[in-house]
Image (cartoon, rainbow, N blue to C red):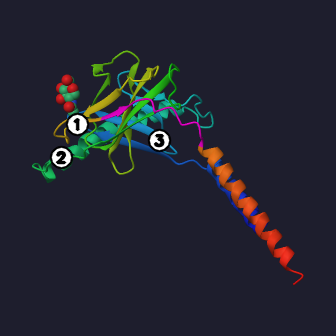
Amino acid sequence: MRLSVIVLIVFSGAVDASAASSFHDVHYIYGCYEHGEVRVDVVVDDDVAAYADFSKDEVVFALPHVPQSVPDLQKRAYELAKASIAHCHSVLGKARKADPGAPIRQEAPDLSMYTRYEGEDGVVNTLFCLASHFYPPSINFTLTKNGVEVTEGVSNLRYRHNSDGTFHRISTLSFTPREGDVHSCSVEHQALDRPLARSWELKERPSSVSPGSVFFGVSLVLCLMGVGAGVVFFTKQPN
Ligand SMILES: *[C@@H]1O[C@H](CO)[C@@H](O)[C@H](O)[C@H]1NC(C)=O
């Protein structure tokens, strides 16, 4: 009985995986900003696959392989992106007329810090500082090491849309953790009264008893208790 349940779960997992690989969700997102900027992204399965670079007159693909099945994909995507500029101006014009005094919505960011690999003293790593769910899409990151601003090895990735209209953005730092170093990330955003900060440092060395060996020890004790109970049960049977 238990075996058939396990097989069923594995099977339904496989069906989901094959469905995901043959159907893709592709859509365009374009953002119209009050100061005239227009951003156009092509989103495939929640990832930005391409974006319009109006200064270079082209759509830049962020994925390594451009699908060949659609002829002139890049050219057609750029035409669509250009068409959205006109649409943006018309929508913004209507919005201004409809409610000229409407306050701009603001959402303060959440901030978190994490590393690509588990931190190890002296081993090269990447630190990520993620600001999420903020609006409008303008944010400044400051990364510091022991209170001193770091700029070398820092890169600020592009803004990304969330489905609720807010944005997230990541700042990364290539670094080598050392015991005692404290790295901090702080962001400035117009919805915050003062900068929001998080910090990261190497964790204390784990104690010599690992969770795995505790689990093994507890399992062994339970197993021996089971064997003991069985022995008592069977030796009592003849009575
Ligand atoms: C980010 O920094 C720039 C330059 O210092 C400043 O003009 C801008 O107001 C800052 N933005 C935010 C959201 O604090």
| Pair 2/1: label in front | 1
Label drawn at residue 96: none
Q: What residue type is labelled 1?
A: His
Whether 24 is drawn above or below 141: the answer is: below
Q: Which amino acid does label 2 sit on?
A: Ile
Q: What element carries label 3?
A: strand
The residue singled out by tag 1 in the image is: 189
Whether residue 214 sits left or right of residue 121 in the image: it is right
| Whole-percent x, y for residue 141 in the image | 29, 28
Whether residue 180 sits left or right of residue 69 in the image: it is left
Q: Distance from label 1 to label 3 (Cα)? A: 26 Å
| Whole-percent x, y for residue 220 in the image | 72, 54
Whether 230 is drawn above or below 113: the answer is: below
| Pair 2/3: label in front | 2
| Total numbered labels placed on residues in the image | 3
The residue singled out by tag 3 in the image is: 43
Whether 109 is drawn above or below 222: the answer is: above
- Majority secondary structure in the magenta region: loop
Whether residue 173 sits left or right of residue 213 in the image: it is left
Q: Residue at x 20, y 38 (%)?
A: 34
Q: Is mark 1 on a helix, strand or loop?
A: loop
The residue singled out by tag 2 in the image is: 104
> How crowded is the residue under tag 2: few (<14 C-alpha within 10 Å), some, or many (20+)?
few
Q: What element carries label 2?
A: loop
